Image: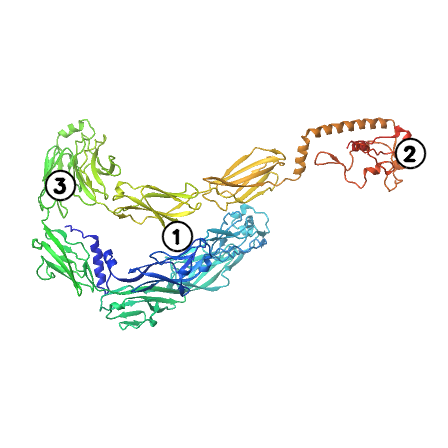
Amino acid sequence: MARQQPPPWVHTAFLFCLLSLSGAIEIPMDPSIQNELSQPPTITKQSVKEHIVDPRDNILIECEAKGNPAPSFHWTRNSRFFNIAKDPRVSMRRRSGTLVIDFRSGGRPEEYEGEYQCFARNKFGTALSNRIRLQVSKSPLWPKENLDPVVVQEGAPLTLQCNPPPGLPSPVIFWMSSSMEPITQDKRVSQGHNGDLYFSNVMLQDMQTDYSCNARFHFTHTIQQKNPFNLKVLTNHPYNDSSLRNHPDMYSARGVAERTPSFMYPQGTASSQMVLRGMDLLLECIASGVPTPDIAWYKKGGDLPSDKAKFENFNKALRITNVSEEDSGEYFCLASNKMGSIRHTISVRVKAAPYWLDEPKNLILAPGEDGRLVCRANGNPKPTVQWMVNGEPLQSAPPNPNREVAGDTIIFRDTQISSRAVYQCNTSNEHGYLLANAFVSVLDVPPRMLSPRNQLIRVILYNRTRLDCPFFGSPIPTLRWFKNGQGSNLDGGNYHVYENGSLEIKMIRKEDQGIYTCVATNILGKAENQVRLEVKDPTRIYRMPEDQVAKRGTTVQLECRVKHDPSLKLTVYWLKDDEPLYVGNRMKKEEDSLTIFGVAERDQGSYTCVASTELDQDLAKAYLTVLADQATPTNRLAALPKGRPDRPRDLELTDLAERSVRLTWIPGDDNNSPITDYVVQFEEDQFQPGVWHDHSKFPGSVNSAILQLSPYVNYQFRVIAINEVGSSHPSLPSERYRTSGAPPESNPSDVKGEGTRKNNMEITWTPMNATSAFGPNLRYIVKWRRRETRETWNNVTVWGSRYVVGQTPVYVPYEIRVQAENDFGKGPEPDTVIGYSGEDLPSAPRRFRVRQPNLETINLEWDHPEHPNGILTGYTLKYVAFNGTKVGKQIVENFSPNQTKFTMQRADPVSRYRFSLSARTQVGSGEAVTEESPAPPNEAYTNNQADIATQGWFIGLMCAVALLVLTLLIVCFIKRSRGGKYPVREKKDVPLGPEDPKEEDGSFDYSDEDNKPLQGSQTSLDGTIKQQESDDSLVDYGEGGEGQFNEDGSFIGQYTVKKDKEETEGNESSEATSPVNAIYSLA
């Protein structure tokens, strides 16, 4: 039979009593006791031993402690008292020892590096934190260097060294090309644990990209890139034929000589490595060779630990997690290819920082009791143990005759109130230390009862039960039980008292009913409590249903008469084939029987009558067999028209409990179509009055069900029946039932943090409904803080479903928590959600480069913006062609956020292009960066030519020149046809050579050669004719070297014949106007 379950606090008290008898007193978690008892300090929270902080944020060094009275705090820095009051940047949080160092008004975080230790003190002792080493994160810049191209023979090994700048903590290393494409790694090319890039053998295709080492620093979230290496591969097969990559003998096909393996890292044939217990052991072997060697790992004298070992980096690394002493020994890696194999042996030594075997625990004793503190640790080398009391070495503490130190144990005898103190055990070796605080508290507390008074326990006759009586006191009280306030201590026979004080009655009888008193006693007093025990009669089915055989169509009655305790509420229901029975219109359920009318074949089966109360139940089973016979009226029922079921009626609520209730209803007529399901709905009158919600669904064979309820909801229910035709009308509502309140058991869902403006973050969530509120005045505690800053949480209480955080930096991550709270308390600790403040326009893309490899294409490359200010949604490129003053139509291209390259085809080889590139977030496009394509060859000439050729003045001038030249040609033609000769007197100092027949008589024939274009003339960029530069001036061609200009500035010097001047002047027909002179005179 079921026994009433004890309340939850009983289990806690039971555990407490077991602990108390093990030699020390454990203080119960009851807040009233915790607040009343004196207690030395206990450190509850502290920063990690190696505390690395971000230089951009304020420094937070945590130290929190509890005690009664509340402890005060002070700090040491580098083993000297740290006077916080003298430094305006340093403050201590209220009711805490946590240090806050604020740099908003200036200062350098590096000035505060050092070793800190927190002391928490009250009048009963002093507790110490660990020694906290504060270091400021560093991300130094990569040293400037110019890297020459690396020249290597194809097939040779190669190591590209990274040598990152030393950061704190060490940066994460990865290799990429200068265009931010990751370097593909395989067993031939891979990155070592030291960050270097190893090529087991270099192939020609390795020259297709450059190689840049990148270092990512944790705290600053920055990536620094080393100048890239460029490879120049010398090869006997200059063509990089991609078909050879899959050649079965690729190296021979490319003329690369095969080589046996050799180790690139580590060097030589043997090395050693030390690792600390509990850490990961990483062994690495990287080998060169042609073909690329395979790596295999072995351990001498045993197998690799399969549960902890895993291979990494294409089998080049062996990692063993959580190393222990049995992992020490010799490991070796075997590198092999078809040319041979070599191996490297690594001797592994496992050392250990101190680790606990027995960590000292707080010791609570009564006056005069004995106890001990044990501090036992192991390590390699063996750690030493140092005891301190209240932060001072035990050797320098005042002598205590009740205390004896025996190595790793302190023994206390006949302790007194004055023995209260906090002891520290520091165990250390060369690899680290452990520090533990344990206080010794001596309490004299009179007995106290921890359970509610005057409990009522109801139990069924002849059952077993246990009466609990949790208590507390110091010294540990003794507990005795009495019945009805008289008689001797109950123990033995039908009673058994457990060590924790609980009383068990092995078999309940009527005479056991009564009031039981438990009395706890120690030297300081006594306390008592009472438990009232009521004995109830068992529930029994005294007339059980019997097995029956019935013909189809007949009526069957199954009896079930029950006797029960009249003070308990009885419920009787039936099962068919161990499933709840649907009582349809052919069945009638009465108080002591079940009647089935018109028995059908489907009615055959087992029927179980279940009679139950809140304390016990009884059941009886019978089997019904149905015999086939002539047609029965049930056949006529099958022919009747089918309809929706009638509504259920007479809803009744029973078995009312805090979180459940039984709902029973009477089914309506199924209208010749069996009811398949019932839907139970509920309505509450606080959040959505008048709105019905589905609660649960039950099979059509059920007309009673236990409904699970939520706290603090004023329920009323209704039921809808469903058959194959449709749903019934809802039943009339039941009476209302309000459950008691409780703290929320969940928190709001769909918590988000998104910026609606660049300087805010809107925190939203889906509010909780009536069935999850669990109490009145539902509200939400909204907390937020910058992610990974360790700053204190900001919080606000909100009654709605949103809260806007203002004055936030642009697009930074926040940790967000939203916790439900009502008047009964808070919900569970909420999950942390990451949200982001508002986005802004991004800065301009970096390093925008325009390259023109030929006259057909232009290549554009760029890097991501330095300040994205949000999630990049893409890039917008606008460009336009121009040729002098002509400007083409603007073209817009949109790219994905990952694209940083674009190649465009030129429309013509002459035009230039102006490019404008900007990045986009959801806010819009940010600042643009503008570049122009380089000028193609002879572009300036072509552009100016095109510009001048379209000017009206230039066209008119050319027409005039053409007309003049035509006129001169006609005149020359006429002169020549007359056979005239034109003397020329050369002004040059060099005499005419006699070998030239045309010069012998000082004259020359005007021949067709003179019609050739003038040598040395050229077209200038502005469209005019420019004479080729010469040492001769126009004056040299005038008479007697005296060239003259007319008043309008035209040159009038002319060629003359070799006759005397007078004769020449008298013969006007002998003067000939040279086409050249005519043209120059126009100028």
* Residue for point 19% across, 38% down: 736
Q: Which residue is identified by label 3?
A: 623
Is 201 rendered above or below residue 402? above
* Residue for point 48% across, 51% down: 222
Q: Quadrant of residue 422?
A: bottom left
- Image position, residue 727 (x, y; %): 22, 31
Residue 607, visible in the rendered structure: no
Amino acid residing under circle 2? Lys
Q: Which residue is identified by label 2?
A: 1061
- Image position, residue 387 (x, y; %): 33, 69
Disc number lying in front (3 or 1): 1
Judged left or right of residue 56, residue 798 is left
Q: Nearer the viewer, residue 804 or 601?
A: 804
- The CA span between labels 1 and 2 is 109 Å
Disc 2 element: helix
- Image position, residue 706 (x, y; %): 19, 42
Q: Nearer the viewer, residue 362 or 758?
A: 758
Residue 174, visible in the rendered structure: yes
Q: Which residue is identified by label 1?
A: 791
Q: Quadrant of residue 408?
A: bottom left
Circle nearer the N terminus (1, 2): 1
Display coloring: rainbow
State which quarter of the image contains the C terminus: top right
Judged left or right of residue 1033, residue 820 is left
Circle nearer the N terminus (3, 1): 3
